[in-house]
Amino acid sequence: MTPPSADPTAEPAHQGGATAAPADVLLDWATRVDGDSPRLLRVLGGPGVGKSRLLAELLQRSDSVPGARIHATVPAASQTLATVAWELGRQLGYGPLPPEELVARVAADPRPVRILVPDLQLVGAGLPEGGAGTRPADVAERILAPLLELPHVRLAAETGTTELLALVAPVLDVELSPESASVMPRQADGAHADGPAPEQGPAPQAIAPGTDWAGLDEEERDRRLAASEVEERGRLLADPGYLVHGSPVAVTAALADPRTPAPGRLRRVWSAAAPALTTFGLDAVERAALLHTAALSTDPALAEYLRPLAATHNWSAHWSHAHGGAGSLALVGDGLAVADAVGRVLFLDPATGSRTGVLPTVAGIRPDALTAVDTHVLLCLDTDGTLHPIGPDAESSTVTAAAAYHSRRGLTDPRTLPTALACGPTTPLAVAGADGRVHLWTLDGAGASTGDSDSGAEPSSYQAHDLPVTAVALVRPEDGPLFAATGSLDGTVRLWDSISGTVMPEPVERRAAVPSALAATDTTTGPILAVAWSDQRIHLWHLLSGALSAFPWPAPIESLAFAADGTLFISTPTTVTAVGLAPLPW
């Protein structure tokens, strides 16, 4: 953000001829809900007058004022169109999305949204020239203006001048000390509306073979790329060390320029990894782990180069393979079952990811979730909410009693249709529904329900959530109680245990996102719970200590599954990946 040099509350704001303290004007604007109130607020003024500080004060004060909460704050200085969209999507709980998809998701979400964008006028500052989406107008025209067409969106942006978002009306402009500094519109040579572009300093030295990028400070690494000629950029980007230690935003901008030479399949790898790589707070080792994961299925040479550094991280991918339409996962016997887009169930070798077999399913069934009830039978949740045992012994399996029970309930009341499944070698079968309830069926060694639908037997049940359950996972530690974890559209993950027979009063986690998948397993350090969220993050909970570890993932997560050795399998719409985890907590 622009460093403030003046107290913003000491300057008048101009609002229809009246004057008020700027901070109060912004807070009043944030709480307005009447249709006549401008939904766009622009903070104007020259450099160093306190524009960013004013927005920071609004952010701080809004938390304590009912109806003024700010849902996303995206400082735009030295960002690009893509990276602003990714960060905005992350903060709104959708995960990193391209601009048009982000606008569509916000349009489909009826919740009121308030957004702050400091330093809009500094988009692209200090980045390599020539890349797409590096002008302030790109962000204003392709993200912010379309969002402001939505009646439930309110936006405060630091624009410096009235040129950005000039066509959006009505607008409330708050101008800070307009006579204290001249306002310079952005020029074609890269100058910015808030003053000249950041100084580049002396020309960087030529790139030496084997440069120790970790030994250079961040500004020097970024300047090497920004100041390089197009051909020199290609040599920088051919160095995996620079990809790990350099600015992910700057590399994204350089690769967006079609003139930049890119070795091998780097553009494809970077396109897959960049939304996760630009997550705030990642160190070089975690960047290596993410880039290694993306390269495994696309650029084996780059993946092998990154492998030694990636392997030192708390998590690293063993293998990752492309699988079009990959969906639910389930460990069954010695194999990993993966449902695909055409209704088949593929079997993979958990150690290598290579295909070992295929199980054709019944015509018309599209598996939305899978769980293994024994080594020869999978229980499949169809996209229509019905349950179907599949596999060589499916017809003789008396788990059909559970399937029939839930089918009958669904016909009577569609709110009870199953939405999630889980079962393990030492746990019951859990069937969770759209009504927020979880049903536990005790199975014998052959995968049979202890009850019989004709005799009126029913599962034990409990209310986990008020909204539909999106995922369920079970774990029974050695000599311990059964734990059932559930995620819901209410944005919470809750835990039930067999000793109390109740749901714990406080959720394990509550976020402005939706849990999309759960998996649980027992380890040498205690049971752990993996939670995949709609914003493409994976959270690992060490249940005994309550310790949380988290990392971003490069794509939306469809399903999770744990192997007995603690390997975590992750499916996305295009890949299946096996990830090794260091013992938790970490």
Image (tube, rainbow, N blue to C red):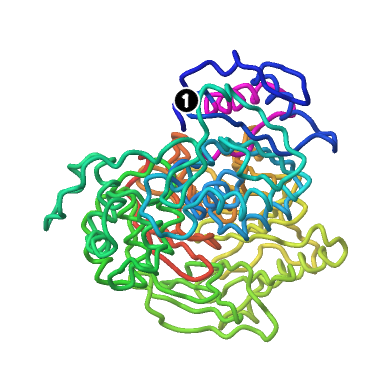
**Residue most extreme to the right:** 412
The kind of residue tagged 1 is: Gly
The outermost residue toward the left is: 209
- Percent coordinates x, y for residue 220 in the rendering: 24, 42
**Outermost residue, top side:** 10
Q: Which residues are magenta?
A: 51-75
| x and y percentages locating residue 442 in the rendered image | 63, 58
Along the line of sight, the residue nearer the viewer: 459 or 324: 324
Q: Quadrant of residue 422?
A: bottom right
Q: Is 70 left, or right, of 406 in this rendering? A: left
Q: Check disc 1 and report the residue beneath it.
A: 48
Taking the spot 80% from the left edge, 34% from the top edge, the residue there is 37
Residue 303, by quadrant, is bottom left
Q: Nearer the viewer, residue 16 or 260?
A: 16
Name which residue lies at 37% across and 68% down. Answer: 267
Q: Is residue 119 left or right of residue 150?
A: left
Name the one closer to the observer, 402 or 517.
517
Instruction: Give the quarter of the image for residue 273.
Output: bottom left
User: At 55% across and 77% down in the image, what residue appears?
Assistant: 340
Q: Secondary structure at mark 1?
A: loop
Residue 336: say if magenta. no
Compared across the picture, whether 43 is left or right of 276 comes to: right
x, y percentage for residue 214?
20, 45
Could you classify mark 1 by the number of other residues whose Cα lies within 10 Å: few (under 14), some (14-19), or many (20 or more)?
A: some
Taking the image as drawn, is residue 470 in sight? Answer: yes
Which of the image's four quarters has the C terminus?
A: top left
Res 496 visible: no
In the rendered view, tell whether residue 527 sits above or below residue 572. Answer: above
- Magenta residue check for 59: yes
Q: Nearer the viewer, residue 53 or 388?
A: 53
